[in-house]
Image (spheres, helix red, strand yellow):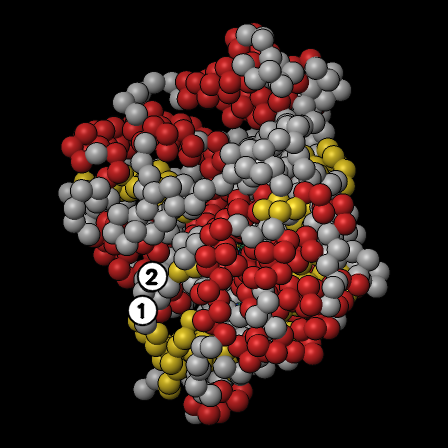
């Protein structure tokens, strides 16, 4: 193949920039991506594309991307070869754990790990090589409450039901703005189009959000709730279902435990009791409950605004309780569990191990672990506080917690005091600037793509895979190879062939599978099965293995029509695996084998919600919420010139009445103060936020020295998370409270 700069061709690439996972057709001149459009033949996205996907080429070719590793010498980060970079790691880390113990090495996993193959395939091996419990991820800034509620209800923290957008008659959406975010924990290319189609077919859309978002404007009803009050609203809806005898779990009835206990638990949360705290009148609450119960099918769906709040786990739990009580969980048109092609093949229903919280706790504040993770809001104190088990080294994969987590200034100082830090990141940014070694992955066009995470959250079962659209440039390493080498370097096998990591994992999986009497390959030999795997790379062979052993797989001959990597490669636009289907009881892994409606940790957290009923707030008090902009993505897409400007700016949105009371004009600068600090931002007066609420987007504050993101630094914005001190958490999940934060706002002089 020639890569002459005059040849123009197209190649398919699944978009890694948000959860919608659209199929893109890239135009490539030589080795440069010069265009991107939606792939009309993609079995799932059918040609949809958004402005971010359309800017794929700009992002891919960003001149600020690192093209060589960086290694710190004499305090300064300098360009280095891959050999030097891994030598530095192998020289530093093993001695450090020998001296200070395994807990002295922390790991931070950021959001893009769910958008890359490498991020899915290697962190488990890295963690098991390190044997550390100091794991912090973006989940505790995001969806950990949902994992905890699913773990407790269904026994599996990854069993997350998704709303059946294409078939539902009624959608109650809380704290999500898919018209800007393109959806989350609900993978649906063209989410906006699906909501419009929903309205068009006569289904009802209710949006609960303190802001009148683009999504809210599309709805039949917009409920401008007071931030942080969703759990109260949902508890009152549940109360009404019981009070008015509207519960009807349908076919789920035989799979439930604790129905009466839930009725008792929500008894005092009457619409009248919660109305003031939610700022939603009791009549509206009763109407919503009755409509939910009366709809032929309905789905309740909550996201960021219902998770990153003080009662995030309770709200996440109540979302599913409502789906269950109305008979909508696990039925078409309701909320269903997807079945992805790389999931474990369904077992026959049987009691499982259940889900346990708090098996260990963080060293300094004693925060309980959830899903093996500690709150990222507690990372700085774990680095700063002396004593045994203090974190002295940190491996940061695709994360920028200096901007994305609470109190970045404190974390910034803490990171600068580490003995050793590694960042796997394409940018020298607010976090990676502290690293001793920076390992840059290649641009996305040069990576293969498979959505291990999002296929399990998709509104339709389907499977797609794209190989690199452009060959790996000279001098770069694929991210899978980077992470495999990292695993070797930290486990005393520095210099071994990175394919050894994949081979080892394949062997381990096969050994376990052939020993399982329920497996189609029971009794066969791992070596024989491993030899049958196809694929040009270690990650491809692992994908082939998962596909073959998965629920649609050919099972190494058990089902000759089933899925393999080769079959998938023969379908470049993907394979449709059909509509979501009911999966209870096969998904359940609780100890009882049933859905445990009122798990003990939830029951123990409810008194905290009761105290929220009585919270006093001054007439002029203000709380802060976040927002997302269509042409942005957390902290790292502000460096793409084509995506800057328009609504994608860091302003403090405020209702005209609040602005008038405070004497603030549009464009004037305001100082915002909260427990964690203060910042100054330009005011944008808009009726899209309700009174008593101000809004700032996150991921801004690109004004620190030592970074290399020139476009972002030219209009840096402010870091909203500087307003937080990291102490405010949803206790059950360790998730930082990022919405509904009390603030004071004053004109800035
Ligand atoms: N106030 C407030 N704070 C928030 C939120 C909020 O709503 N409000 N949202 C939270 C949420 S939902 C999340 S998920 C977190 C995100 O928190 P993080 O994951 O810490 O933040 P990102 O900005 O996504 O940063 C991702 C990092 O990965 C790098 N990167 C990009 N692509 C790749 C790649 O292919 N490989 C590698 N190795 N690195 C890559 C980027 O350069 C960047 O440094 O932020 C949270 N913070
Ligand atoms: N364009 C863009 N797309 C993205 C991202 C991005 O940064 N930009 N980030 C990606 C990531 S990592 C994630 S996790 C997803 C998130 O996807 P979404 O959950 O859709 O995220 P948001 O757009 O932040 O929507 C959250 C909404 O909750 C509202 N809200 C705040 N507080 C409350 C409250 O107390 N109650 C209620 N009911 N609502 C409240 C906010 O006003 C906001 O409109 O988006 C992903 N997609
Ligand atoms: S909606 Fe998401 S996945 Fe689709 S093109 Fe836009 S950024 Fe990419
Ligand atoms: Mo997220």
Query: SS class of the residue under badge 1?
Result: loop
Work out whether residue 612 can be spotted.
yes
Question: Which label was assigned to residue 590?
Answer: none
Foreground residue among 742 and 122:
742
- Residue 31, located in which quarter of the rendered image? top right
Quadrant, the N terminus: top right
In primary-sequence order, the first of circles 2 and 1 is 1
Residue 705 seen in the figure: no
User: At x 38% / y 18%, what residue is drawn?
Assistant: 497
Task: Please tell me whether residue 507 is drawn above or below residue 440 in the rendered image.
Answer: above
The CA distance from mark 2 to mark 1 is 8 Å
Q: Which mark is residue 676?
A: 1
Residue bearing mark 2:
726
Looking at the image, do the residues carrying marks 2 and 1 touch, with CB atoms under 8 Å apart? yes
Which residue: 53% across, 70% down? 229
Check the image and name the residue furthest to the right.
Answer: 201
Q: Which quarter of the rendered picture does the C terminus lie within?
A: bottom left
């Amino acid at each position: 193949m020639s890569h002459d700069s005059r040849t123009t061709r197209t190649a398919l690439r699944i978009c890694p920039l948000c959860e919608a996972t659209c199929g893109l057709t890239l135009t490539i001149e030589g080795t440069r991506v010069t265009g991107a459009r939606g792939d009309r033949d993609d079995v799932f996205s059918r040609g949809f594309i958004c402005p971010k996907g359309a800017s794929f080429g700009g992002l891919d070719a960003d001149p600020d991307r690192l093209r060589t590793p960086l290694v710190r010498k004499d305090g300064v980060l300098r360009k280095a070869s891959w050999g030097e970079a891994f030598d530095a790691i192998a020289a530093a880390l093993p001695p450090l754990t020998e001296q200070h113990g395994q807990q002295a090495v922390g790991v931070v996993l950021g959001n893009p790990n769910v958008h890359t193959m490498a991020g899915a395939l290697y962190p488990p091996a890295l963690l098991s090589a390190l044997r550390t419990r100091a794991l912090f991820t973006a989940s505790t800034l995001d969806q950990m409450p949902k994992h905890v509620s699913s773990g407790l209800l269904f026994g599996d923290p990854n069993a997350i039901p998704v709303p059946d957008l294409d078939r539902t008659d009624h959608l109650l959406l809380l704290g999500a703005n898919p018209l800007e975010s393109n959806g989350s924990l609900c993978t649906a290319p063209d989410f906006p189009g699906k909501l419009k189609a929903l309205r068009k077919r006569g289904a009802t859309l209710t949006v609960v959000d303190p802001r009148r978002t683009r999504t809210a404007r599309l709805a039949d009803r917009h409920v401008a709730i007071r931030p942080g009050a969703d759990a109260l609203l949902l508890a009152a809806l549940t109360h009404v279902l019981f009070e008015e005898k509207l519960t009807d779990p349908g076919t789920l009835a035989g799979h439930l435990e604790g129905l009466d206990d839930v009725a008792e638990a929500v008894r005092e949360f009457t619409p009248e009791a919660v109305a003031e705290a939610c700022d939603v009148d009791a009549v509206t609450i009763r109407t919503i409950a009755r409509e939910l119960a009366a709809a032929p099918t309905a789905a309740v769906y909550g996201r960021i605004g219902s998770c990153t709040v003080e009662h995030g786990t309770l709200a996440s739990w109540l979302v599913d309780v409502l789906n269950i009580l109305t008979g909508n969980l696990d039925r078409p048109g309701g909320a269903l569990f997807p079945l992805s092609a790389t999931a474990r093949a369904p077992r026959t229903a049987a009691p499982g191990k259940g889900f346990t919280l708090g098996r260990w706790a963080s060293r300094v504040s004693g925060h309980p672990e959830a899903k093996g993770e500690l709150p990222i809001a507690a990372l700085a104190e774990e680095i700063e506080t002396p004593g045994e088990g203090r974190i002295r080294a940190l491996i940061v994969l695709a994360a920028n917690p200096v901007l994305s987590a609470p109190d970045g200034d404190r974390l910034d100082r803490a990171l600068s005091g580490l003995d050793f830090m590694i960042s796997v990141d394409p940018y020298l940014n607010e976090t990676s600037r502290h690293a001793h070694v920076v390992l840059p992955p290649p641009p996305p066009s040069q990576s293969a793509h498979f959505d291990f995470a999002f296929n399990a959250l998709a509104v339709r079962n389907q499977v797609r895979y794209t190989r690199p659209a452009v060959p790996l440039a000279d001098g770069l390493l694929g991210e899978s190879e980077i992470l495999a080498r990292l695993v070797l370097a930290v486990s005393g096998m520095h210099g071994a062939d990175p394919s050894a990591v994949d081979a080892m994992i394949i062997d381990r999986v096969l050994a376990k599978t052939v020993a399982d009497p329920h497996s189609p390959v029971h009794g066969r030999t791992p070596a024989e099965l491993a030899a049958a795997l196809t694929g040009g790379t270690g990650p491809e062979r692992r994908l082939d293995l998962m596909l073959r052993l998965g629920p649609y797989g050919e099972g190494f001959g058990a089902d000759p029509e089933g899925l393999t990597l080769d079959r998938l490669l023969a379908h470049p636009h993907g394979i449709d695996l059909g509509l979501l289907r009911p999966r209870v009881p096969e998904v359940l892994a609780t100890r009882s084998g049933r859905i445990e409606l009122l798990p003990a940790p939830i029951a123990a957290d409810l008194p905290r919600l009761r105290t929220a009923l009585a919270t006093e707030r001054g007439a002029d008090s203000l709380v802060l919420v976040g927002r997302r902009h269509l042409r942005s993505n957390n902290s790292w897409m502000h460096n793409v010139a084509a995506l800057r400007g328009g609504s994608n700016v860091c302003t403090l949105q405020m209702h005209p009445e609040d602005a008038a009371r405070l004497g603030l004009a549009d464009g004037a600068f305001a100082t915002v103060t909260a427990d964690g600090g203060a910042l100054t931002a330009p005011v944008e007066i808009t009726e899209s936020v309700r009174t008593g609420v101000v809004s700032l987007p996150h991921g801004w504050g690109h004004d620190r020295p030592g970074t290399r993101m020139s476009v972002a630094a030219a209009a840096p914005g402010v870091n909203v998370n500087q307003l937080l001190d990291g102490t405010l958490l949803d206790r059950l999940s360790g998730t930082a409270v990022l919405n509904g934060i009390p603030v004071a706002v004053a004109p800035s002089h």
